[in-house]
Amino acid sequence: MDKDLLDLTCLSRCELTGLLDLADEVKANPRKYAESLKGRTLLMMFEKPSLRTRLSFEVGMTQLGGHAIYYDLSTSPMGRKESVADTARTASRYVDLIMARLFSHSQLVELAGNASVPVINALTDYSHPCQVLADLQTLRERKERLGGLKLAYLGDGNNNVTHSLLVGCPLAGVDVSVGCPKGRGYQPAKEVLEEARKIAVRLGSSVEVTHDAAEAVRGADAVYTDSWMSYHIPKSRKAERVKALKPFRVTAKIMSNAMGDAVFMHCLPAMRGMEVTAEVIDGPRSVVFDEAENRLHIQKALMLRLLGVA
């Protein structure tokens, strides 16, 4: 693994599997790791709102014996009075690890390039690797394997979670199918799709993009969706997006095209009646809160690994 985790392309299949194995171990035996990061400090930089990201990282660092500092970038000079590079160099003199939840992925890359301590991508406009690591841990728990499974994603394909799923699934041996509207604004970024297909060819899985929701879901072991109104999307576009994305809403009828034991996944927060119906997200096939919990365990594993402790 590189010094940082900025995107899942930083990982090999072996490294990915090792992180999932460590996360399972941390989850099963939390006391074993209770003092592993004693005396270590995590800086948490937030430009976007958060519930799961803040709680899982802060609780995780506490449970590992360390300390976490919440830093609200709306009150920070970074990018205005002080450069990103100088912020990174200064913070590196104080803390052992940085996680950043930013709008701009290029700003995250600049931060990591100038930090002497590991930097974790806790979400950018481009990717959300920590979420997808937790998703893969959850899927493996439920299905007892990853290789040969199929995950279908419905909704906005030009989305940070979609991008990380496109890379993470073939890296783990999972076939991935994206069902999204036609049009540049709704389809995965070209460079992400190209990279995902390269990984799939190399490691023996498949990557598909279709504009038919039922086709995307057919034979899937997991059906995934995300919010139609991400933080960077202006409210003025809501009506337009609802019209375009409505055919990709996850309903019981859509789920009937998947395998009989398929699970429903969502990174949360969710809007019932928008991207998913209540009967699906609140039904017995939903694993959304398992995914939320596993953010804690996979991020603990990630921090341990990046700091060379486990």
Image (cartoon, helix red, strand yellow):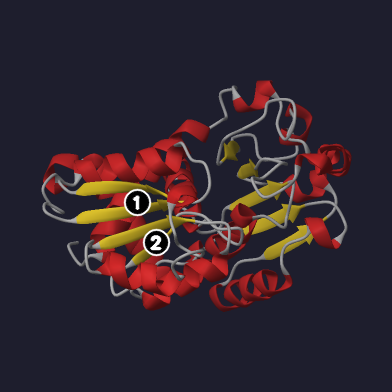
**Given the image, on which type of amino acid does mark 2 rest?**
Ile
Q: In the shown orientation, is residue 309 left or right of residue 16?
A: left
For disc 2, the marked residue is 120
Of residues 263 and 31, the one drawn nearer to the viewer in this rendering: 31
> Which element is circle 1 on?
helix
As drawn, 83 above or below 65: below
Percent coordinates x, y for residue 72 in the rendering: 42, 47
Q: Are marks 1 and 2 in contact (CB under 8 Å)?
A: yes
Extreme residue toward the front, this view: 81
As drawn, 243 above or below 212: above
Q: Is residue 218 visible?
A: no
* Image quarter hosting the N terminus: bottom left
Q: Nearer the viewer, mark 1 or mark 2?
A: 2
Instruction: Write down the quadrant of residue 117 in the picture.
Output: bottom left
**Given the image, on which type of amino acid does mark 1 rest?**
Gln
> Which element is circle 2 on?
strand
Residue at the image point whose x is 56% and y is 71% from the top: 106
Of residues 1 and 128, the one drawn nearer to the viewer in this rendering: 128
Residue at the image point whose x is 55% and y is 41% from the top: 267
* Image quarter hosting the C terminus: bottom left
Q: In the shown orientation, is residue 42 left or right of residue 71?
A: left
For disc 1, the marked residue is 299
Task: Answer few, some or many: residues within 10 Å of disc 1's Cα (few below 14, many 20 plus, some between 14 and 19).
Answer: many
As drawn, 172 above or below 114: above
Percent coordinates x, y for residue 88 in the rendering: 36, 69
Mark 1 or mark 2, earlier in chain:
2
